[in-house]
Amino acid sequence: MSQDLEIVGEAPGNNIQAFIDLTLLNCNLKGVYQVFKNGETGEKKTKILVMPTDPEPQSMTLKELIAEINNVIQSFGKGEKVTEESMEATLDSMGLKKIEDIRVQIRQLFIYIDSSSIEANSKPCEYAFNFVILNPVNPDESLKLFNIKSLGLAVYNTDRKKIIERMQLENIDELLA
């Protein structure tokens, strides 16, 4: 997919744009890298954006994830493969019995950088990452006191509505209301 680059209000200068569409853990992502220089002021701006393009977060089984990790290991070197047996032993201790039923999901992977050669025009880097295990986690028989229905981690510093909505975050104030 190509896009026309229009830099409104900028004088002609040297411009570069590179983009990539890729899939990571069944999450469709777009990455865009832009560099443009204002011919009149000499200001050089660099923008980098990585964000999901699929409307809803997708997931994949842990078995599929292990296969993908092993493909990467084989492609880039001679590292030791991740075995299903070693993963099953670890997961079994957490109460996750069937490796083929475990689903992982990247709900959000967002990076936005807008920097300028004129420091006052640079903006702080924004990011958001949200990873979720969608299956219940039931500890072994000795810990029947509790079980975990889902487990996730979100790390972010953005307040962009579209990015936050996709993460499906819990809000403590709303939960207490």
Image (tube, grey):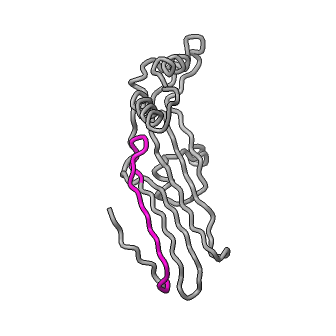
Q: Give the quadrant of residue 26.
A: top left
Q: Residue furthest top?
A: 142
Q: Is residue 6 above or below residue 76?
A: below
Q: Residue furthest right?
A: 119
Q: Is residue 93 above or below residue 24?
A: above
Nearest to the observer: residue 97 or residue 139: 97
Nearest to the observer: residue 77 or residue 155: 77
Q: Quadrant of the N terminus?
A: bottom left
The residue depicted at 52 percent of the width and 60 percent of the height is 160
| Residue 119 in the figure: left or right of residue 166 | right
Q: Residue furthest bottom?
A: 40
Q: Residue furthest front?
A: 78
The residue depicted at 48 percent of the width and 46 percent of the height is 168
Q: Is residue 165 above or below residue 153?
A: below
Count numbered badges in the picture: 0
Magenta region, mostly helix, strand or loop?
strand
Where is residue 76? Give x, y as percent.
48, 38
Membership of 22 in magenta stretch: yes
The residue depicted at 62 percent of the width and 71 percent of the height is 122
Q: Is residue 171 above or below residue 64?
A: below
Where is residue 111? Give x, y as percent.
53, 56
The residue depicted at 61 percent of the width and 48 percent of the height is 173
Nearest to the observer: residue 130 or residue 51: 51
* Part of the protein shown in magenta: 10-29
Where is residue 47? Give x, y as percent.
53, 67
Q: Give the quadrant of residue 170.
A: top right
Where is residue 130? Give x, y as percent.
52, 44
Q: Give the quadrant of residue 124.
A: bottom right
Membership of 42 in magenta stretch: no
